[in-house]
Image (spheres, rainbow, N blue to C red):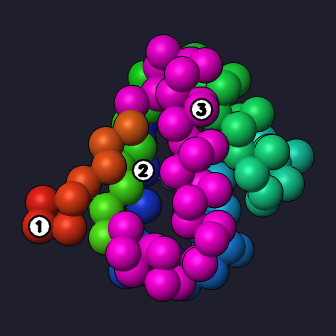
Amino acid sequence: MGVILDGMSIHNREELHELLAQALGFPAWYGGNMDALFDCLTELREDTEIVLCHTEALEENLGPYAACLRRVLRDAVEENPHIHLDIRMEEEA
């Protein structure tokens, strides 16, 4: 299971959370915010790869929310050994 978070395709918070919920099969109670994201990620019991690319575009589109996303993803990786995070440099994307 996995998801590619492409900063060039994500234009707002709603798109981000919708993509995550659909790709990772989050439950109906998923609230589409960073607290709910952390909760859902740390409850995953299947190996899950999250690829974050075009981070500059993501920062342009989401502003400071992009840094919050990276922090939540990194915190979830520390909590849950099933999550694998790949943050790609722009030239690798």
Above-or-below relation of 22 to 83: below
Give the numbered dot on residue 3: 2
Whichever of callouts 1 and 2 sits on the residue coming sooner in the sequence is: 2
Give the numbered dot on residue 75: 3
- Residue 92 placed where, x, y %? 12, 60
Which label lies toward us, 3 or 2?
Answer: 3
Mark 3 belongs to which amino acid?
Asp
Above-or-below relation of 83 to 71: above
**Most distant residue in the left direction:** 91
Give the numbered dot on residue 91: 1
| Picture residue at 24% right of the left edge, 54% below the top | 88
Whichever of callouts 1 and 3 sits on the residue coming sooner in the sequence is: 3
Separation of disc 1 and disc 3 at Cα? 25 Å
In the rendered structure, are the residues bearing label 1 and label 3 in contact, judged by CB atoms less than 8 Å apart? no
What's the magenta region?
Answer: 55-84
Name the quadrant containing residue 79: top right
| Picture residue at 80% right of the left edge, 45% below the top | 36
Foreground pick, 51 / 28? 51
User: Is the N terminus in the top left, top right, bottom left or bottom right quadrant?
Assistant: top left
- Dot 3, how many residues are within 10 Å of its Cα: few (below 14), some (14-19), or many (20+)? some
Left or right? Give the position of 72 relative to 58.
Answer: right
- Dot 2, how many residues are within 10 Å of its Cα: few (below 14), some (14-19), or many (20+)? some
Q: Main secondary structure of the magenta part?
A: helix
Foreground pick, 8 / 19? 8
